Image (cartoon, helix red, strand yellow):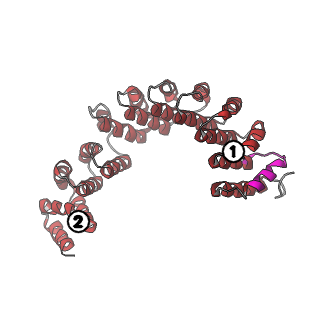
Amino acid sequence: MLARWRTSRLAKTGRLESLARYLQHPDWRVRREASSALAAAGERAIPILVDTLACTDNPAARLEAVIALGQIPSESVIPPLLEALGDEEGMVRREAATVLEQLAAVDEGTLLEALCDRRWWVRKAAAWTLATHGERAVAPLTRVLVDEDKGVRRTAAWSLGRIGSPKSVSPLINSLRDEDPSVRAAAAWALGKLGKASLSSLLDALDDDEWWVRRAAAWALGELKDKKAIAPLLSALGEKDSRVRAAIVWALGAIGSEEALIPLLRYANDPDAKVRREAVLALGSLESSMGKIESVLAAAITDPSAIVRNAATLAAEKRLRLSPRGHPKT
């Protein structure tokens, strides 16, 4: 209580250097009060908070410094927040990333400069934040799709997907051939947001060596909802990895063609619960009059897995809504 009273007094007297020492107090409430007081001091507190980030071994103090910087309405907070993305403590890095993302009004010139920084974490943060600048950010993000760091390339792909510009389709297709599978997976996800021009390349990605790329490609094909993808997706159902099978089953349900009905009925009995859940949900969405769907859903309501039982209940309710007179189709 005494420490909190002292922080309040220091804030009123403007003794910011003394106030900053309370960022290292063992009581989180004292640290937060000191952080709030420093933030309220505005730009005068920025050098003190920067010193805390650079010179303090206490990660809790560095975290509070990042929180305080995020509350100061000044572009001067951007460089230290970018620097904090390289902090050795994960919670400090996460908070800095969150704050930067929330600062949608960050000057575009500052971000473009950061995109050329020698430090990969600064370039990565800039690539993520640039997504808030829309179409204007497509060209610089496209350029960093070939950055030397895979994290920067992956983040650029995610940001291009968030922007959703057709101009990024071709460079993202090129990224489907990136040496790093996480970049290829991010590119596949982004292409799922960008329309059917990438259909052929996403179908090729179903044969990628890494399972998470195949899963991302299946999801993207489901997002595109192009019936040309049904036959390749059905062929890919022999996939050994259950996570990819689940994505393929989901994609077939998202496209919603009766061509997938028989395979979906079969995969409602898959050994993996997540695959069964996706198959059951997909069956509930099909506007089919086949009575076999109801019997499969009825069996799924007693499935050993709770996620399948819940999915079966939802699917059965959806089938009732799809029926013209509120009764299951037979």
Q: Which corner quadrant of the image does residue 135 belong to?
A: top left
Question: Please, is residue 248 above or below residue 274 in the view?
Answer: above
Q: For the residue labelled by badge 1, is the local secondary structure a helix, a strand or a loop?
A: loop
Question: Please, is residue 304 above or below residue 238 in the view?
Answer: below
Question: Please, is residue 136 above or below residue 37 in the view?
Answer: above
- In the rendered image, the residue lying farthest to the right is 330
In percent of width and height, residue 180 lies at: 44, 29
Q: Nearer the viewer, residue 20 or 11?
A: 20
Q: Amino acid at mark 1?
A: Asp
The residue tagged 2 is: 26
Q: Is residue 153 magenta?
A: no
Q: For the residue labelled by badge 2, is the local secondary structure a helix, a strand or a loop?
A: loop
The residue tagged 1 is: 270
Q: Which residues are magenta?
A: 285-299
Magenta stretch: dominant secondary structure: helix
Circle 2 packing at 10 Å, graded few (<14), some (14-19), many (20+), is few
Q: Nearer the viewer, residue 11 or 304?
A: 304
Locate residue 106 relative to residue 160 in the image: left or right.
left
Question: Who comes first in sequence, dot 1 or dot 2?
Answer: 2
Q: Is residue 287 magenta?
A: yes
In percent of width and height, residue 239 lies at: 63, 34
In percent of width and height, residue 101 lies at: 38, 46
* Residue at left offset 58%, top offset 25%: 201
- Could you tell me which quadrant the N terminus lies in? bottom left
